[in-house]
Amino acid sequence: MASQTVLPTVAPEDVSMGPIDWARWAAPGLIWGSSFYLIAEGLDAFSPYLVSWLRIGFGMVVIAAFGGWRGSVDRAAWARIGLLSVVWMALPLTLFSLAEERVSSSVTGMLNGANPIFTAAVAAVIVAALPPSRQMVGLAVGLLGIVMIAAPTWSEGSSSASGILMILAALACYGVALNVAGPVQRRIGSIAVIGRALPLAFVWTAPMGIAGIGDSTFQWRSFLAVAVLGAFGTGVAFVLMASNTGRYGSTRASSTTYLIPAMSIALGVALRGETTYAIALLGSVVAVAGAYLVNTARRP
């Protein structure tokens, strides 16, 4: 009887990455990093409520084209999807648009580098247990980075301070959403979850979005910016991220978010003439370092 050779199973995180793999890994982070510049372009002509509503609408069309509406979903999954439509889409996307009326796109992007920190903090609250020591250090480092980023803008006045609070509230929503999304995404798939949550978010944001038409003027530049924002930032990037998670593992795939601050700073400074403070730039690096520690920690 011939012997059989059993080949070892290679984990996604251990697969060697070539140039095409690195491009796939970077794409979601670069797209999301550009979203804050596109929001600012949209706000030049549209109200923040109309920007968020149109963004969700364009994203919904793209996800539907990828088959996000297919298949049946049980009642328990629908309860989570309904919650995600609020805390992952309708509320944070509206808060970002409102915040960018008060703070620059580069500051918004820099603060988004701390997204994994909020996710880990919410996870610790949900399980009612302290995270691993490496994550604890990462949370502390990330918090320091957030303070460094926010300090110059906070001192500019109450309007800027309220913008910072809106961004932090949006990140807290993402922290809740990513912890809620995990189990249901593993059951029915990421695209199926997003494909059902986006239409609900479109309905929730419709009243304010329609009302915002009266406070807006039509400009092709702003319209195209919001169309790209929705189609890519709320559509294509989610599809790529779902694909990368299966291809490279969740930890490696999620590290694409470390590209968000650099992309938002580059576009804000180069294309919108925004200024950034040295302490905020340093804080962005500190926040990303904290997010890296949080994202690479392992529980026993």
Image: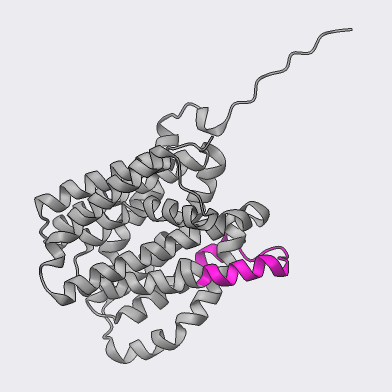
At 47% from the left and 66% from the top, the residue drawn is 88
Which region shows up in magenta? 61-85
Which secondary structure type mostly characterizes the magenta part of the structure? helix
Q: Identify the residue at horizontal 34%, vertical 88% (top origin).
A: 213
In the depicted structure, whether residue 196 falls above or below residue 12: below
Q: Position of residue 42 (x, y in %)?
A: 28, 73
Residue 71 drawn in magenta: yes
Exactly how many numbered labels are in the figure?
A: 0
Residue farthest front in this picture? 129
Q: How is the image coloured?
A: one colour
**Image coordinates for residue 106, horizontal then vertical, percent:** 21, 59
Residue 234, x across and y down, in percent: 44, 63
Q: Position of residue 283 (x, y in %)?
A: 20, 49
- Pick the front one: 146 or 42: 146
Q: Is residue 38 left or right of residue 176?
A: left
Any part of residue 231 in sight: no
Is the C terminus in the top left, top right, bottom left or bottom right quadrant?
top right
